[in-house]
Amino acid sequence: MARPDELTFAPLGGVGEIGMNLSIYGLGNRHQRTWLAVDLGVSFGDEEHLPGIDLIMPDIGFLEKERNNLVGLVLTHAHEDHFGAIIDLWPRLKCPIYATKFSAALFEAKCETEPNAPKIPVTVVPSGGRVDVGPFNVEFIPVAHSIPESHALAIHTEVGTVLHTGDWKIDPTPLIGQPTDERRLRELGDAGVLALIGDSTNAVRDGRSPSETEVGRTIVELVKNARGRVAVTTFASNVARLKAVADAARAAEREVVVVGRAMERVVRVARETGYLEGVQNFRGPDLYGHFPPDKVLALCTGSQGEPRAALARIANDDHPLVTLNKGDRVIFSSRTIPGNEKAVGAIINGLVTQGIEVITDRTHLVHVSGHPRRDELRDIIAWTRPQLLIPVHGEALHLSEHAQLARAAGVPKVIICRNGDLVRLGPGDPGIIDELPAGRLYKDGTILEDAKSRAVIERRRMGFAGCVFVAIAMTEKGELADDPVVDLVGAPEKNAAGEAFDDIVFDVVVSTVEGLPRARRRDPDALAESVRRAVRSTLNEQWGKKPLCLVHVLEV
């Protein structure tokens, strides 16, 4: 009897990190496989290490080469770290996309606001429904999360069934949408689950994630007992939280004013798809000043400290329509994503300095995670009884803790892999069998650069030690035609002895040129390299840093 095709799995993003999720499943043999992609997300640039880089995306070079064998892209949900790279990267793949109604609608709304966004068709699949994508039968199983219509995917193949959890938690009382479908997950376990590819974000946290309903009760109390204006900031995509804030405002007889385009977009899509049915109409920021302080609540973008988002502008007294005063209250109904602590802290400090009361999850239950803690991870293992578990969606510590928990829970095989590892799921003994190309793409303005990009590398170096520009005019005989021109950017003006760095560099350039053999002075490339080395060496001696040095030689 012929051995069936191998079923394989490879993360191309989202493993060993949080964000930038891209997973692929392959069916076939080592000579040819049919591929199914799950999610295509971004992570966000860090100004300290990647100055000027807005977004980071998975390198899809492997999928571009395999484009003819890529049967589709399936979306678990509509968070940026799961679908934020599609507009930029889909034109390189042009594969069918499958998503449920809310995710498709939010994606369409996002495309409308992106300049020059390509027309990208999305096939809508009902929540709980199934769709054939090439040889893969994909089932969308509802799970609770911090955005409507998050789904685990049961990927059914002739080799077996894989459960790709996506982002999930167990919330028996979600404010919006369906709870995690325990009944269906137990049915899958009874039928047999070959592998569970599972969310590890909260694998280091004991117990269970609290419910959105508990957060809603806290927000009601905080809005009711506030005396002045109230502003609430949260992730725009958390529609359940938006509803909780609206309910709190109604109970306190306050009008809700929506401030920020991302928030406005999500509110519109949530109303169109029925997730804010029965919720009062919200007002635009132009009406904010028309309401008494105790009758208004501003629902703002900017929970992560984004400099041009609504809350940052309000905190800097830079918003044209919305202001806060001493005695007003701001509620951060969110958690700070790692890397954003400084930006969020700056806004909080700015508000506190103005006498505005700031409430965070440090003191009140104003936010809960959308990811499972350890008891929830044990539950899904008990329900599905997988033969193999692979932790994903987490940094190294999260993956390790999830793996240890799975082994203790009796999972027969646990594999920790890295981005690019190709894992055989079955048939036969699972294991890492190959390594696929994996890496990062950086969105620099409107241009996508790879990790080796000169722009990315040089800008990082310039951010650390500045840059020196040197222009030299040489005669045909190899003599200086005029004084060199020197310009230092991002360097101190003087050394420790008080000598001007401009003069020091000028002297080094002249002495280097005059000290070279005439033949070398006639070679523009050799001359430029000698000057570059001398300038960097001197500055390192005088300053302790080696700036980028650009030397231009002009022959006259």
Image: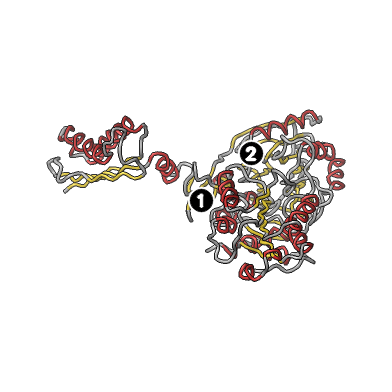
Relative to 63, say whether 253 is above or below. below
Tag 1: amino acid: Lys
**Which class describes the residues within 10 Å of circle 2: few (<14), some (14-19), or many (20+)?**
many
Which one is in front, 306 or 219? 219
Gap in angstroms between the C-alphas marked 1 and 2: 20 Å
The reply to whether residue 145 is visible in this rendering is yes
Where is residue 422 shown, x and y percent of the image? 64, 37
Relative to 284, say whether 16 is above or below. above
- Sequence order check: which comes first, mark 1 or mark 2? 2
User: Residue 443, labelled with which disc?
Assistant: 1
Q: Residue furthest left?
A: 477
Where is residue 385 shown, x and y percent of the image? 83, 36
Residue at 69 percent of width and 62 percent of height? 297
Which one is in front, 426 or 242? 242
Relative to 491, say whether 446 is above or below. below
Q: Name the residue that disc number 2 marks.
A: 15
Where is residue 148 shown, x and y percent of the image? 74, 56
Tag 2: amino acid: Val
* Proximity of marks 1 and 2: CB atoms separated by less than 8 Å: no
Residue at 73 percent of width and 44 percent of height? 371
User: Residue 230, labelled with which disc?
Assistant: none
Left or right of residue 545: residue 86? right
Where is residue 68 shown, x and y percent of the image? 60, 51
Residue 105 lies in what quarter of the image?
A: bottom right
**Which class describes the residues within 10 Å of circle 1: few (<14), some (14-19), or many (20+)?**
many
Q: Secondary structure at mark 1?
A: strand
The reply to whether residue 137 is visible in this rendering is no
Q: Secondary structure at mark 2?
A: loop
Which one is in front, 409 or 438? 409
Residue 33 lies in what quarter of the image?
A: top right
